[in-house]
Amino acid sequence: MTLPDLDRICVVIGRTRHGMMLAELQEAVKQGARFIELRLDFLKKAPDFKRLLANKPCTLLATVRRPPDGGKWDQGEEARLMLLRQAIVAGFDWVDLETDIADRIPRFGPVRRIISYHNFREMPADLEKIHQRMCAQDGDVVKLVVRAQHPADNLRVLALIRNAPKPTVAFCIGEMGFPSRILQARYGAPFTYACFNKERNIAPGMPSFAEIRKIYHYEQIGPETRVFGVIGDPVGHSLSPLIHNTAFRQLGMDAVYLPFRVPRDLLNDFLNAFQELPVEGYSVTIPHKEEAARLARHHDETVERTKAANTLVRDDKEFLAYNTDYEGCIDTLKTFLPTFSKPTDAEGPPSVSPLDITSNLNLPAGALTTSRSAAGLNPAAITSAPGSSIVTAPTTSPSPEPVGNPISGRVALVLGAGGVARAVAFALQREGALVTVTNRTLQRAEALASEVGCRCVEWNARHNVLCDLVVNCTSVGMHPNVDESPLHHSFLKPGLVVFDTVYTPEKTLLIREAAERGCHLITGVELFIRQAALQFQHFTGKSAPIDLFRKIIRRALSPVQLREEQA
Ligand SMILES: NC(=O)c1ccc[n+]([C@@H]2O[C@H](COP(=O)([O-])OP(=O)(O)OC[C@H]3O[C@@H](n4cnc5c(N)ncnc54)[C@H](OP(=O)(O)O)[C@@H]3O)[C@@H](O)[C@H]2O)c1
């Protein structure tokens, strides 16, 4: 039996009132939906089929889901079966029948049948057998929905689709299962599901119709589509899919970029499992950057220095690792610093020489430093109170300072000692800046300073550091804690360069206060788009449309958009 010419996206509508269900139906059709599932189990009153099916605008599927299968039906099973029979006779084009009841409802006229299986708790051990049995039932499409317990479960469900004796829709629910919802298209599933209204929480991890079309371009995905993605945990709010997928479209590439939620300790298993596709390149985020650097066969210099990779590019059966946060930081500073005017003496003190640092340290007892003797500092000039936690002074030579390099000679304070701070501190030091690191947890600052070969001070002494460039690499000020700043505003003087790597929101409290006090500003969006552009280049060998990246990110971060996401 051949399938009618079906739309590749089935848009799901679940509302408690008929009026709202019909309003969403009309709106979905207006937005291009051609195949819509009405979740009758959501309706508070008995479905009025006459009303629902009057002027039917597109192919309609009727579903009445029980709670164990993720539905809201709260009446008896016999009443449910009756309702399904009525829906079939009333004029729906398709009906969804769970595998255990499908044989009790005979085929009627031209109405097509989906035979479905849902397991929201786990991945059943006998998934393949269940699928086989379902294919033998009287259905036009077989649908299996299970909960992914391991990232590789995505591949197990997708394997059902290829070579299935009946057209099969198979995917995992939840954030970990999201890739299977999209990759179904590559494996030949007749369609996937998307909700019209995300606020309705139809099923865990179900994307919206707008998202699946505008971000993932689902309808264009086929067997040859190249696959890329971001690995992290959590990963659901990453903006990387938005920008990379947009860039693929802009450049006319047949490629898709997906979020892969990979729990800590599963990176190696995940990479091996997804070689099957294969995934050609990954952006890597928390908590996998260091493990990614260890697992890659080959590193470039940026990874060797930072011992962290935020980019993996497949090379035959192995991966090459890069750290584009490092490269992006240098690129951002080299773009912006030459555009900033030097402060005049009257404006304040930010133009600092390395020696000024020692004379202006003015540290409270216990606030401690590491010195960089080769950079012109005299270690003896740095005092330490007895019992204070002195960080041993590394004696690495300063990097050569390229002529005309705007970073060289800068006196930089790096706030934080996490992933981004690592990249930023190494990059600044490499480019000839004199770096001081500070962090809430002193031990981490000490460890980073010792690796980089720079100074460190205790967190509560950070306001005593004289610098002409400060880079916030902590998460302070990040959404939802937008009323926090890692620095007291009195620290912010005219002419000081303030680079906040936080980009959600772009205008952090630190950036706003720095603007008010006449500082030069660099926002996290500038770093984000540059590190992403470098990744894109590593992935594809093509230049990324960076202005488009900036536009997309700013739009995605606009307060209106953020409010919609939280709703
Ligand atoms: N623009 C970009 O492209 C880009 C890319 C990645 C990240 N970022 C930004 O950088 C931030 C850090 O990311 P990451 O990957 O480095 O994260 P991470 O490895 O988890 O490091 C977080 C850092 O923030 C510090 N911190 C957290 N809460 C703090 C608080 N209340 N007070 C003082 N310090 C605090 C932590 O200090 P402890 O060591 O004491 O915990 C640590 O140094 C993110 O929030 C993000 O906004 C930007």
Image (spheres, rainbow, N blue to C red):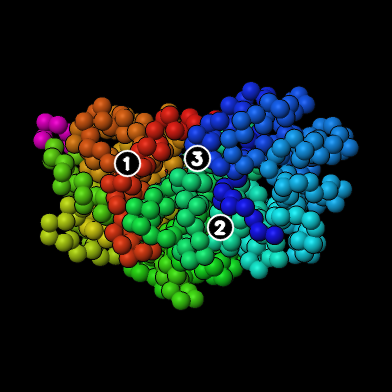
Q: Is residue 386 left or right of residue 383?
A: right
Residue 71 in sight here: no
Label 1 sits on residue: 551
| View quadrant of ligand 1 | top left
Whether the residues at callouts 2 and 1 have beta carbons within 8 Å, the answer is no
Residue 436 on image: x %, y %: 31, 49
Name the secondary structure under disc 2. helix
- In space, the residues marked 2 and 3 are separated at their CA atoms by 18 Å
Residue 149 on image: x %, y %: 68, 56
**Which numbered disc, 2 or 3, marks the residue that appears first in the sequence?**
3
Residue 192 on image: x %, y %: 60, 50
Image quadrant occupied by the C terminus: top right
Residue drawn 54% across the image and 68% down it: 277
Residue drawn 19% across the image and 36% down it: 495
Label 3 sits on residue: 32
Question: Is ligand 1 less than 8 Å from the beta carbon at label 3?
Answer: no
Span highlighted in magenta in the image: 344-349
Label 2 sits on residue: 185
Name the secondary structure under disc 3. loop
Residue 565 on image: x %, y %: 51, 34
Q: Amino acid at mark 3?
A: Gly
Q: Amino acid at mark 2?
A: Ala
Label placed on residue 121? none
Task: Report the mark closest to the observer, 2 or 1.
Answer: 2
